[in-house]
Image: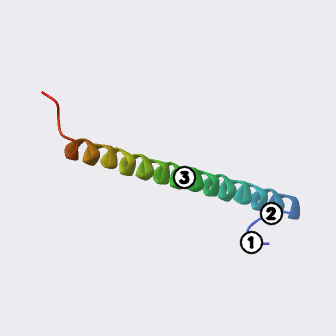
């Protein structure tokens, strides 16, 4: 069966593949969430800088 000596080895390989894929999916989701948070933070910082630029400075 696809180069495996027995069904147990085949299932073990399938489970390892599934676990690897699941870890990769979770890592992608975490990276995506971090990317979204960074974008929100940048937008907020830009807004704060723009507000500072508009506000008159007291000498």
Rendered location of residue 16, percent (x, y): 73, 55
- Tell me the crowding category of disc 2: few under 14, some 14 to 19, or many 20 or more residues within 10 angstroms, Cα based: some
Instruction: Give the residue at mark 2.
Output: 10
Q: Is residue 9 above or below residue 41?
A: below
Give the left or right position of residue 35, taking residue 27 as reference: left
- Secondary structure category for the residue under label 2: helix
Instruction: Give the residue at mark 1.
Output: 2
Q: Earlier in the sequence, mark 3 or mark 2?
A: 2
Residue with the most extreme top position: 59
Q: Residue at x 80, y 63 (%)?
A: 10
- Secondary structure category for the residue under label 1: loop
Pointer 1 and pointer 2: residues touching (CB < 8 Å)? yes
Of the 4 image quadrants, the one containing the N terminus is: bottom right
Instruction: Give the residue at mark 3.
Output: 33
Numbered tag placed on residue 54 in the rendering: none
Rendered location of residue 28, percent (x, y): 56, 56
Closer to us: 49 or 16: 49
Closer to us: 40 or 1: 40
How many marks overall? 3
Query: What's the CA distance linking mark 1 and mark 2?
Result: 8 Å
Closer to us: 54 or 39: 54
Query: What's the CA distance linking mark 3 and mark 1?
Result: 38 Å
Residue with the most extreme left position: 59
Q: Residue at x 48, y 54 (%)?
A: 36
Pointer 3 and pointer 1: residues touching (CB < 8 Å)? no
Of the 4 image quadrants, the one containing the C terminus is: top left
Q: Earlier in the sequence, mark 3 or mark 1?
A: 1
Give the left or right position of residue 44, taking residue 30 as reference: left
């Amino acid at each position: 069966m696809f180069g495996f000596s027995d069904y147990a080895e085949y299932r073990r390989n399938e489970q390892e593949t599934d676990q690897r894929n699941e870890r990769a999916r979770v890592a992608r989701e975490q990276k995506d969430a971090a990317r979204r948070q960074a974008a929100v933070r940048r937008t907020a910082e830009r807004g704060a800088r723009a507000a500072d630029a508009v506000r008159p400075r007291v000498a």
